[in-house]
Image (cartoon, helix red, strand yellow):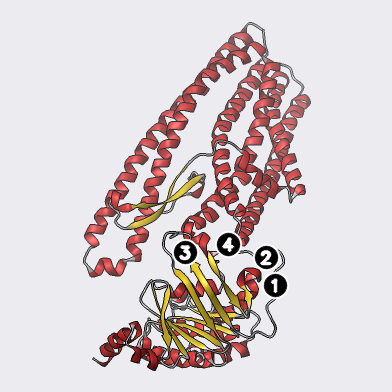
Amino acid sequence: MATDPTQRDPADTHTVRNDADDGLGGVTELLAQPQRARSLGPLRMIWEAARNYPDKVALALVALTITALATLAIPAGFKLIIDRGFSAGGDPADIGRWFRYLLGIVVVLGIGTAMRFYFVSWLGERVVADIRLRVQENLLRLAPSFYEENSPREISSRMTSDTAIIEQVVGTTVSVALRNTLMGVGGTIYLFYLMPRLTLGLLLGLSLLLPVVVFAGRRLRNVSRSSQDKVATIGALVAETLGAMKVVQAFNQEVRETGRFRDAVEATFATAKRRILIRAALTSLIIIAVFGAITLIMWRGALAVASGEVTGGTIAAFVITGGLVAGSFSALTEVFGDLLRGAGAASRLSELLAEQPAIAPPRRPQALPEPPRGSLSFRQVTFRYPTRPDVAALKDFTLEVQPGETVAIVGPSGAGKSTIFQLAERFYDPQAGSVRLDGVPLTEADPAQIRRRIALVPQDGVLFSANARDNLRYGNWEADDAQIWEAARAANADAFLRALPDGLDTYLGEDGTRLSGGQQQRIAIARAILRDAPILLLDEATSALDAESEQLVQQALDRLMQGRTTLVIAHRLSTVRAADRIVVMDDGQIVEQGTHRVLTERGGLYARLAALQFGREAA
């Protein structure tokens, strides 16, 4: 169920809520309802982005001024037409002159409106595009620890719904605010010029209505927030159910899921009814007040015309201008709320722009030696993840990996195996000890240089929503088709790639869903081959594959490992028997290490794991 992003209150905080409390089941992250910004200060970010285009800003302001003044000139035109054009015995040529004057105003208003729409809309789109680019550039600099503490779903919301609000603010709200301010102030001045006493009475009468409108408006906003919360719940429920459709149908839970969805929809409808009722009452109140005031003005004006105090054109101009002024100030109250919502959105995006990467190059990074040797060492490393500060993933961990050596890392889940890879690529820094690449401490080197010397094959071949060529050359974007096909052959991927409908130009689907798991993994291996790095990290690269795919992938890995320093994380011990050294970990520490034969004879943890696995395979 789609919602208009411009109706969302973007200054929100996002929380992880337990949907078991409202019958949704499981833990689903939803957008919490927004908290309104208390000032317009954060809008400075938008102004700073708009200042990069001073010519467009100037043209937009000129167009705004022209349209506001042209709108205010219309009542004066009617005054002249009524007083002079409709006067008895008027000269037809003179009558035509006043109508041409009014027609000229209309033409100016139309052209000015078109200019205003174009330049203001252009600024809205350009400012949002620039802000999105700046935020994305900064997000790509941040370390993985940031994304442990901040949900990517929340960040995605900021990049979409919040920027949509900013686009509305720049492209519409600011324009409406400035135009109505000019019209309201200018119109009030003109009303005092026409009929000072009646104008003062009108303003006093409308001021009595203001507290009621403000109270009803706040109530309407609160109910609207609640309504949006219900809509968000529906969206989360749909995503959860459709994402687990196989499980739903496998356990015959279609009726129950329909009931849950019906309850959520009915709750949303009940809240929407309250919102509609309040808005209907508020609309009725404003219409009665505004048009009642205009009626009273016309009544008073008719008496004044009859007594000769004012002309018919004056009272007509007063009524039209009064309507414009009332509409302008009424719009400003609504616009101010939109500006506050825009300030909230800008504030949240400013937080992302202000975020500094936890892992950054030192001011004077130490150069890594050339040519690369491929040595990697961990010396008395202790590390705790930011989200788990009480649990040490590694404890006084020391490991020296020589150039060209293949080291397998095994152990039970939670032993700290994957943490070694995270530290090797300097996604994190240890709290104690040091990690060195070719003798250089990682904290003293440029992280980009470190990662250029490492190729990773993850457990799941991560693919992007792109064609095969772009997924393959992700490890080396400058690779040509000849290099890509060579890497594909080495990864046992060329056969299925050539069978694709458009070859390397074939779109692989979101997350590579058009390929099997084994095919995805072989593309990941080809990507690592194109990387041509001296150090290779294999993170359980064959654990989720069937026997045939595993054999093909293992053959590709054997070719990839030749001449490279290789660290292998594996649960299937059969894949690491030929490693130069096997490091056995438990509870963040090395408990034993050696070759497969030595460790098997020793009778320790590795021997027990091997007996369990090989005995099960034999069975």
Q: Counting other residues with Cα less than 10 Å from the Cα at mark 1, is it few (<14), some (14-19), or many (20 or more)?
A: some
Check disc 2 and give the amino acid type: Pro
Q: Where, by quadrant of the figure, is residue 610 drawn?
A: bottom left
Q: Nearer the viewer, mark 3 or mark 4?
A: 3
For the residues labelled 2 and 1, say whether their Cβ atoms are less than 8 Å apart.
yes
Check disc 3 and give the amino acid type: Arg
Question: Alpha carbon of mark 1 to alpha carbon of mark 3: how far?
Answer: 26 Å
Dot 2 falls on a residue whose secondary structure is loop
Q: Which residue is mark 1?
A: 366
- Tell which circle, 1 or 3, labels the residue nearer the N-terminal end: 1
Q: Which residue is mark 4?
A: 142
Check disc 4 and give the amino acid type: Leu
Question: Alpha carbon of mark 4 to alpha carbon of mark 1: how far?
Answer: 21 Å
Quarter of the picture containing the C terminus is bottom left
In this rendering, the answer to whether 166 lies above or below 215 is below
Residue 374, disc: none
For the residues labelled 4 and 1, say whether their Cβ atoms are less than 8 Å apart.
no
Q: Residue at x 73, y 38 (%)?
A: 108
Check disc 1 and give the amino acid type: Gln
